[in-house]
Amino acid sequence: MHSQNRRREAIIVLILVMFTSFITPFIGSAINLALPKIGHEFNLNAVTMSWVTMSFLLSSAIFLVPIGKLADIYGRKRLFLLGNLILSLASLGAVFSPNGSVLIALRAIQGVGSAMMFATGIALITSVFPPNERGRAIGLNVTAVYVGLSAAPVIGGFLIDALGWRSLFYIPALLGIPAVVAAIFTIKGEWAEAKGEKFDLLGSVVFMISMSALMYGFSKLPTPYAFILTIAGGLGLYIFVRLQMKAEFPVFNVSLFKTNRLFAFSNLAALINYATTFAITFMLSLYLQYIKGLSPRDAGMLLVIQPLVMAAIASWSGRMSDKKDPRILASAGMAVIALGLAMLVPIGMNTSVIYIGVVLVILGFGFGLFSSPNTNAIMGSVEKRYAGLASGTVATMRLVGQMLSMGIATMMIHIFIGTSTINPSNYKQFILSSAITFSVFVALSALGIWASLARGKISQEV
């Protein structure tokens, strides 16, 4: 009977984590469709509009690592449920935003709530499922992320057209709070393997300031002040690492990167994967609308191919990683991604939409094959008391990788087009900037394959 209760609790945890894993990417992706309407209503310029997206990414990234440690000390369930509550209340506030500044602030608060869920979600799954079922559960969770990404262009576009941009925040506002209440009454356990440890406040502050400077600076490259901020952020992170090596209870156990080869290289592979993939949709959406003349809706319907294939493959690859070495599966996935990116390098004015669709299928297959096994490898490489740290590290790698990816793409566009809008007179320069961007991503993918293989053979007994 006891094992039945544990099994039921594990399934409830998985459903809740999958729900939040669907909502966050759904809003993150759908909000980009709504930016023109938000900008029109609040009279925002392009830079201010970008912060509706950027404020969420930035606050998520800087809070992830400290929250991961707090979850290990005070309880993962507690932080996960609090994150759900914060996201729900901030979403409810966003529905009634009176101006752009309030909306941007509420998006930053949403980012804090999401950081709480990102840092604890996979750690909770790792805590409640045995090693031989962990990959399958993680695969289902990754599938929920991709379903959220897949649904965003279709459902998000419909909601925006029918009910306005504020309707995007109805779902987390209306469903999040009942989910928290249900979890309080159904999940009895708590997981806090680092209970009693002292929280490293100094290290947390240094990390948050340094990561803010690095990410903000990189997003504004290649301007001079952006270089200064990026370098300052990098130096700050170096100081953070030195502080953590001396701390009795570090907020981020950097020794894991020195002593745990599997953990270090799996995280490096994740960082490179997100750095090579996140800006693909950004570049292709511009290409399809400007060069190929597709409407936003038609472009979205084509781009949905990639996350749909991801969702189909991620669950299968997660199950496979319980039986086969995740290193081989993840490395194969990265190789498929490199092939897809190489196929994007020569696209031009006359490239067919069918060709783009085929490439998106290949990329989706590669992403799905890489993500679940690599996450399973990271979570299985550490002791359970470090599960919150590992979960937070995975999410940090994702967000930093996403910022690097966008930084590379926007830098290339800035170099070739400058501050001009994209128009027929500079279409050739835009296509050249795309080719250089995808070429850089191919090179990074090759580095990612090396990082994935270099981690060594993975044991499934952790």
Image (spheres, helix red, strand yellow):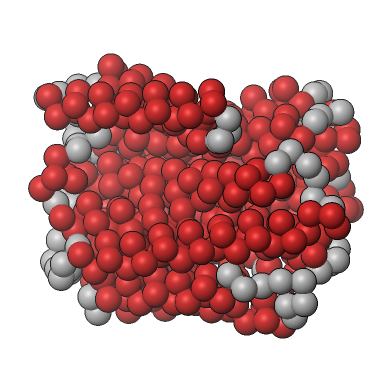
Query: Against 85, is 359 above or below?
Result: below
Front-most of 60 and 228? 228
Taking 374 as reference, is 263 left or right? left
Q: Is residue 251 visible?
A: no
Taking 418 as reference, is 79 left or right? left
Front-most of 278 and 322? 278
Query: Against 81, is 365 above or below?
Result: below
Q: Position of residue 194 (x, y in %)?
A: 19, 35
Q: Is residue 201 visible?
A: yes
Task: Name the residue: 34% across, 35% down.
Answer: 65
Q: Quadrant of residue 4?
A: bottom left
Task: Name the residue: 25% across, 34% down.
Answer: 252
Query: Against 150, is 60 above or below?
Result: above
Q: Quadrant of residue 327?
A: bottom left
How many numbered discs sit on the rendered protein? 0
Q: Position of residue 286 (x, y in %)?
A: 74, 57
Q: Position of residue 72 (x, y in %)?
A: 26, 37
Q: Position of residue 180 (x, y in %)?
A: 51, 41
Q: Quadrant of the N terminus?
A: bottom left
Task: Name the residue: 56% across, 35% down.
Answer: 222
Q: Quadrant of the C terminus?
A: bottom left
Front-most of 282 and 249? 282
Task: Name the residue: 22% across, 59% down.
Answer: 380
Query: Against 170, is 237 above or below?
Result: above
